[in-house]
Image (cartoon, helix red, strand yellow):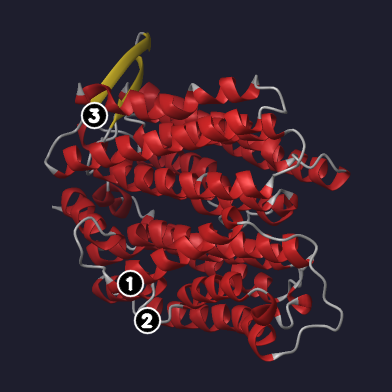
Amino acid sequence: MSQFLPLAILMTSLCVAPIILMMPEHASRLRTTVNLAAAAIKLGLVVWLTIIVAGGGSPDLRFTVAPGLELHLQADALSVLFLALSAILWLITTIYAIGYLEGGVDRSRFFGFFSLCVASTVGIAMAGNLFTFLIFFELLTLATWPLVIHRGTAEAHRAGRIYLAYTLGGGLALTLGTIWLYALAGDVTFTPRGVLGDLPQTDPIALIAIFVLLIAGVGVKAALVPLHGWLPLSMVAPAPVSALLHAVAVVKAGAFGIMRIVYDVFGVEDVQMLGLATPLAILAAITILWGSFCALTQDDLKKRLAYSTVSQVSYITLGVALISPLAAIGGLTHLIHQGIMKITLFLAAGNFAEAHGVKTVSAMNGMGRLMPLSMLAFTIGALGMIGIPPLAGFLSKWYLGAGGLAAGQPAVIALLAGSSLLNAAYFLPILYRAWFLDPPEGARVHRKLGWMLVLPPAVTSAMVIAAGLFANAPFSPLGWTRFIVSLEYL
């Protein structure tokens, strides 16, 4: 029965999507019940799957599509890491989105594609081969586009067109790389330490070209410079969509794809032998610094957070590219830590806009007095991003720094120090305005926030603290990433 768990987890959102899409707009209570029930069931199944994988199990399911092509779902330690993030944050974001869109329009369309987006993310997490990964990776593009343009404004449609141009272009590169590799290797099943060792002698130039195509394909969604231009523009989407794009789905799918390509397609030894690790690390370093510099110039709060994501997600790529077990732990842990920190920031930012119409950094004066709970959550998320101990972000940076030294790359320490200073430079002015300046005279409440908007950022900010304080607890993000790295490197 456990062999069918990956399919059951996928279906909890894939089957729900068309049901919600067909619901009449006035069926608010039924839609809410279906959304929350599906998210809760998925979380329970993921917990069950995690226990199985921790015990050494690896549920595996295959469906033959054509000769040499299989839809392959599997559950390994790496897929469970991404699955757990998706399942937990989907439930939290669903609660927030229900409260956020209360009284809005096109809610059935929104939640239908919201579920399809999560189904695509789950499919990416559990893909057992490169073909299955490609299918769900492209489905994610199609599922998120209606969410980006949900408001229906000219600005939203422009952002949607640019989003499609970038992501479909990336999808084309990923498809070409996949076809080329399949022509050489047949079915490319994800395997610890890669599949290239099973190939006959292959031209290294061809392998380098395939690697570039694959990384470019997933690098669009991972927002690697110069493939990041779509991300700040997509902030025109509603706050739950922004949270989903940055913390759970799109950028995380790209970062996860980089992990799969380096660890389970090429393998760390062959990536290093082909001379690909250093260029990837340099690209990650450039992205980390560029994203932070761009964030400094943004007055729009969500765009500042978007450029912060461009920077922060590349910590994951850096951890993978350093080819060091300690750096890998830092990068993998940051997949989770950045997710819970960034979703906290976006949910709180959505509350500022909904309650007081505050959408810019320059308008944040006195927000700590006006909205103390949401501002406290935002503060915890921001301090975590900077890397203040004992919050979650500190652990990621600690392991990345230790990994850089272990790999003989002391420049990583300078990079992390510089990045943290830039993080402080674009977050601390927000906190200063919110906590130490007076709110503007006549500040009025645009909307009274219910518990569905206040509770989610409070919960995720508590997770930011807990991930740091209880890092050695069973099934913590840090503990699980150590388990993954032991499988990938030993």
Asked whether disc 3 touches disc 1, contact meaning CB atoms under 8 Å apart, the reply is no
Asked whether disc 2 touches disc 3, contact meaning CB atoms under 8 Å apart, the reply is no
Closest to the observer: 372 or 43?
Answer: 372
Q: Residues within 10 Å of mark 3 (few under 14, many from 20)?
A: few
Q: Residue furthest top?
A: 67
Residue 415 image offset from top left, x and y in percent: 46, 77
Which residue bears the numbered disc 2?
Answer: 389
The amino acid beneath tag 2 is Pro
Which residue bears the numbered disc 3?
Answer: 200
Q: State whether residue 306 is above or below residue 19.
A: below
- Secondary element under disc 2, as helix, strand or loop, is loop
Q: Residues within 10 Å of mark 1 (few under 14, many from 20)?
A: many
Closest to the observer: 143 or 106?
Answer: 106
The amino acid beneath tag 3 is Pro
- Give the foreground label among 3 and 1: 1
Mark 2 or mark 3, earlier in chain: 3
Which residue bears the numbered disc 1?
Answer: 468
The amino acid beneath tag 1 is Gly
Residue 283 image offset from top left, x and y in percent: 50, 61
Q: Which quadrant of the figure has residue 52?
A: top left
Name the residue located 80 percent from the left edge and 44 percent from the top edge. Answer: 156
Q: Which quadrant of the figure has residue 326?
A: bottom left
Q: Is residue 111 visible?
A: yes
